[in-house]
Image (spheres, rainbow, N blue to C red):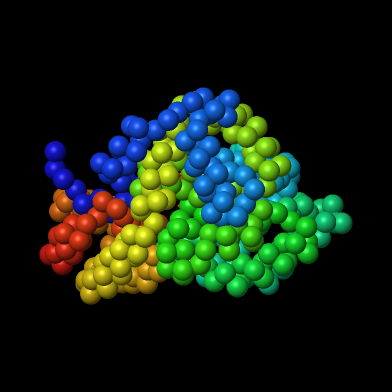
Amino acid sequence: MKKFIDFRSDTVTRPTKEMEEAMFSARVGDDVFGEDPTVNALETKLAAMFGMEAAMFTPSGVMANQIAIKVHTQPGDEVVCDKLAHIYHYEGGGVAFNSGASVRLLEGDYGRFTAEQVRANINNPDDVHHPLTRLVVVENTCNKGGGSIWDIREIQKIRQVVTEKQLKFHLDGARIFNALAETGEHPADYGALFDSVSICLSKGLGAPVGSVLMGDTDFIYRARRVRKVMGGAMRQIGYLAAAGIYALDNHFDRLKEDHHRAKILARHLEQQPYVEKVIAPQTNIVIFHLSQGLNELDFLNKLKEAGILAVPFGRGVIRMVTHLDISETDLEAALKVLSALK
Ligand SMILES: *Cc1c(COP(=O)(O)O)cnc(C)c1O
């Protein structure tokens, strides 16, 4: 089989030898009975890191977000998020499907909106015409925003509005560790601001499966019921939790390497005649626009023939993501291919 350099996503990574060893030697039990010691250790570890009361393992980041939305809302409520939000674009319409809620989209700056925008988009709860605004969701980093990082001071301002208007506040932190690696902020800085936080172990951290949802004890108590209904309560998943613990302990510090490689890749792409514009990457996601008239699928086929994989990200737009399995050598090889592309 031909070996591709795979920039499609930071989810394509395979467990390292050391991670596999941690998985194989995990102590396990039935997590539906709350008896898997490794899952319990992972949940305790993350809750402590973020300074939140409780945590719950989920099979995917989508499920973590969808459970949070379900717990925070009632059918007919409205969820406020950016127009680029993952919960809106990439979760199969789950906000409507699972929670019967509608979505109010804000026009942000690469996925980042302001407290003023939130304030201006909260419906008057005394006017029965409008859905009840219930939940605000922030995505940090923002995937469709090119891995953009939020300014925590704006999130603090949004928190004030959320508190004043008695709303709930959820962080889709699938890639929060990429943000933290760049800003040097602490996970607890984020835990203090949100009612619930989801994180992905299977993105930049390089675990094969898994996400974790955090919140206060009552929130997680209710989240466990929703997870069960969704079929996401699993048994001896300590094997997966062990990969997550290993990833948190060993793969956080190296995220900056991915960010560095993304910057090199972006600078290189800027110089290519077939590229019109590259969104300057702040973390590990490089989004670029092809020159006028070039079709993204044709371009991706050419790229694939040359041994590189990427994904389409809208009309004439391509996304490439750096990760654990893109080495310095892989990057150099990819840059050569990109220069030689006709
Ligand atoms: C990947 C991702 C998720 C979760 O997606 P899964 O495919 O379920 O892991 C959620 N939010 C964002 C911003 C993501 O990038």
Is 118 above or below relative to 35?
Answer: below
Please report the residue visible at 32 percent of the width from the left and 42 percent of the height from the top: 19
Let me know if residue 214 appears in the view: yes
- In the rendered image, residue 341, in percent from the top left (x then y), is placed at 15, 62
Q: Nearer the viewer, residue 98 or 225?
A: 225
Q: Is residue 106 left or right of residue 119?
A: left
Please report the residue visible at 61 percent of the width from the left and 41 percent of the height from the top: 67
Q: Is residue 321 left or right of residue 50?
A: left
Let me know if residue 171 appears in the view: no
Q: Which corner quadrant holds the C terminus?
A: bottom left
- In the rendered image, residue 314, in percent from the top left (x then y), is placed at 40, 57
- In the rendered image, residue 48, in percent from the top left (x then y), is placed at 56, 51
Q: Nearer the viewer, residue 327 or 291?
A: 327
Q: Is residue 247 left or right of residue 84?
A: left
Please report the residue visible at 26 percent of the width from the left and 70 percent of the height from the top: 264
Please report the residue visible at 45 percent of the width from the left and 28 percent of the height from the top: 28
